[in-house]
Amino acid sequence: MVNEGPNQEERDDTPAPESALQADPSVSVHPSVSINPSVSVHPSSSAHPSALAQPSGLAHPSSSGPEDLSVIKVSRRRWAVVLVFSCYSMCNAFQWIQYGSINNIFMHFYGVSAFAIDWLSMCYMLTYIPLLLPVAWLLEKFGLRTIALTGSALNCLGAWVKLGSLKPHLFPVTVVGQVICSVAQVFILGMPSRIASVWFGANEVSTACSVAVFGNQLGIAIGFLVPPVLVPNVEDRDKLAYHISIMFYIIGGVATLLLILVFIGLNAGAFYALSTLLNRMVIWHYPGEEVNAGRIGLTIVIAGMLGAVISGIWLDRSKTYKETTLVVYIMTLVGMVVYTFTLNLGHLWVVFITAGTMGFFMTGYLPLGFEFAAELTYPESEGISSGLLNISAQVFGIIFTISQGQIIDNYGTKPGNIFLCLFLTLGAALTAFIKPDLRRQKANKETPENKLQEEEEESNTSKVPTAVSEDHL
């Protein structure tokens, strides 16, 4: 990962004469001072979302008024930063779902129960709960670079540990590797909102957050598509070990490559349960369709990626946080209901359509939740708000996965999905009662840059009546 803030080459390092400052208030009074946008001038404050420094009286203590402003430009490297983060977030997300997408095959290879394989997914949710606060503290103490390096290193280590589990009796080794990857996830999940806040201007934060979440969802999509193709359902365990090793070597190589790149510098609980149990639900109604089960998962996440990007762009343009969040939540519920009652119709193409529609809204809700929480909790750290959302998702993910899995095993897929629909209904109802106190947007309007613009507009407006009055006279 690169440094938290853009470097100084974007700034104007040539001091301007004082007369020029008075003539042009947009010129920085002390342009040679380096200010990291992730650190506020006042230590008790969090990073300002619009990346504008507070006025400082160090350079010219006697100066006052709008001239005493220092404006920080956004770096041209900001999109590269988001791209690199998205890549290793994608790698980590792939490792989360790679077991669940071919649940029955790993059950046969390791000779364990479906519940044991489910725990390879749920360990991601379980480890997040106790580690959230320590990692959030590390993020505030040491910054994005340290957190990014640690998360990527753990992700790489976990991928290589799994290569030592290519024998049927080595299931505990693959558990250890998965737990290491789950610890890496704690460092990764809280970063999208923080990266968007530190590196992007006020008019781009939602889009940047959506792009950052995009990588995680892309990893899940690949995790649904690739494992069923690389690891066929065969009885010979030696052949299974060979195919599994190919998958593990690929992900290990990708994780290592992403770690090198980082060193160079460059509704959620329901979704988790649905993703973990998707293979079991599809196989229940369509035996032998492991590959199509993976493709259905791919369809859900690809549609969700599109929904996430569209919702981020829409938020940046409309700023209708509560309205958009509520509409998407309700549409998620509608999509889940339709999916529930079409899964057993016997037509896979219908399942593809309904699952894709549900995924468009369910996954598209993720960046909305991150950004809405950041608005409501400002000026608290975006890492804390994202972390609290994620810890809630992990808790409900574990509860929903266990509960829905037991319901499916005992009563079938429809009661299991209805169980999720009930909780989505409750979530939509609670969302409707949230007061849309957009604190971060209010703070953006009070920034020095916006105040200057408002003063200029007021000045121009005040001149118009005078001209009209003279013409009238």
Image (cartoon, helix red, strand yellow):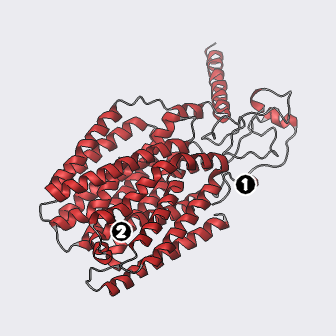
Which residue is under mark 2? 99
In this view, 256 is above or below 23: below
- Quadrant of the snapshot with the C terminus: top right
- Amino acid type at mark 2: Tyr
Residue at point 63%, 64% (across, down):
266
Position above or below: 452 against 36: above
Q: Which quadrant of the figure has residue 172?
A: bottom left
The answer to whether mark 2 and mark 1 are in CB contact below 8 A is no
The residue under label 1 is 7
Within 10 angstroms of label 2, few (less than 14), some, or many (20 or more) residues?
many
Q: Which amino acid does label 1 sit on?
A: Asn
Compared to residue 249, the image places residue 273 above or below, namely above
Quadrant location of the N terminus?
bottom right
Residue at left offset 47%, top offset 78%: 164
Residue 286, image x and y in percent?
16, 69
Q: Which of 205 and 449 is in front in this view?
A: 205
Q: Would residue 412 be visible to someone looking at this image? A: no
**Secondary structure at numbered mark 2:** loop
Residue at image point 85% right, 42% down: 16
- Mark 1 element type: loop
- Residues 398 and 455: in front is 398
